[in-house]
Image: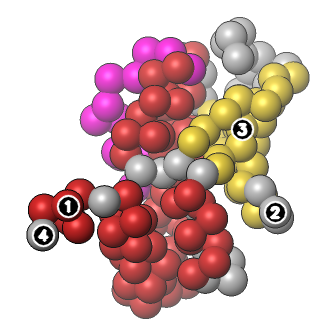
């Protein structure tokens, strides 16, 4: 029984049920806003002091694999991938990744010391665009 509880497939299924069945029903039209701010709150509780720490934290929490794609002035682009992302995309036509977006925005704000917000684009891939108030000098 413990093996079943610990398996990645079970964890992915449980996460998918919560994120893509239960929360949309509970939060309805406020889902995106509430999850974005909840993500920011979660990030404030973590000790994130580098891009690597953010990427590792995404994996540890179960959001998926986060990879920095590019940096241009005040804009950073990131891609979220992995089995959990694929499972969520197959579970719901348009899954919400605003929890992850809020988490990423707060994490970047914490390590950069400047205000940021994150936007989500979902096509074949989940891409976050992080927009900062001023130029970001972060290694990616």
Location of residue 135 (image quadrant): top right
Q: Crowding at label 1, few (<14), some or many (≥20) Cα neighbours within 10 Å? A: few
Q: Which residue is mark 1?
A: 3
Q: Residue furthest left?
A: 1
Name the mark on residue 124.
Answer: 2
Q: CA distance from mark 4 to mark 2?
A: 35 Å
Farthest residue, direction right: 72
Q: Identify which residue is drawn at 40% across, 79% down.
A: 17
Q: Residues within 10 Å of mark 3 (few under 14, many from 20)?
A: some
**Residue mark closest to the camera, 2 vs 1:** 1
Identified at 61% across, 82% down, the residue is: 92
Which stretch is magenta? 38-51
Horizontal relation, residue 21 to residue 133: left or right: left
Residue under pointer 4: 1
Residue 41 placement, left or right of 96? left
| Distance between mark 3 and mark 4 Cα atoms | 37 Å
The Cα–Cα distance between marks 1 and 4, rounded to whole angstroms, is: 5 Å
Report the side of 26 relative to 35 (left or right).
Answer: left
Q: Helix, strand, or loop for circle 2? A: loop
Furthest-bottom residue in this view: 25
């Amino acid at each position: 029984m413990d093996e079943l509880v610990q398996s990645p497939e079970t964890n992915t299924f449980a996460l998918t049920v919560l994120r893509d069945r239960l929360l949309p029903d509970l939060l309805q039209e406020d889902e995106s806003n509430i999850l974005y701010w909840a993500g920011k709150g979660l990030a404030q509780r973590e000790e994130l002091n580098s891009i690597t720490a953010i990427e590792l934290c995404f994996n540890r929490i179960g959001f998926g694999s986060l990879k920095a794609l590019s940096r241009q002035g005040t804009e950073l682009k990131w891609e979220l991938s992995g089995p959990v992302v694929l499972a969520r995309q197959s579970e719901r036509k348009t899954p919400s990744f605003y929890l992850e977006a809020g988490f990423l925005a707060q994490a970047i704000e914490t390590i950069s010391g400047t205000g940021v917000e994150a936007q989500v684009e979902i096509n074949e891939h989940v891409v976050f665009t992080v927009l900062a108030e001023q130029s970001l000098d972060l290694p990616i």
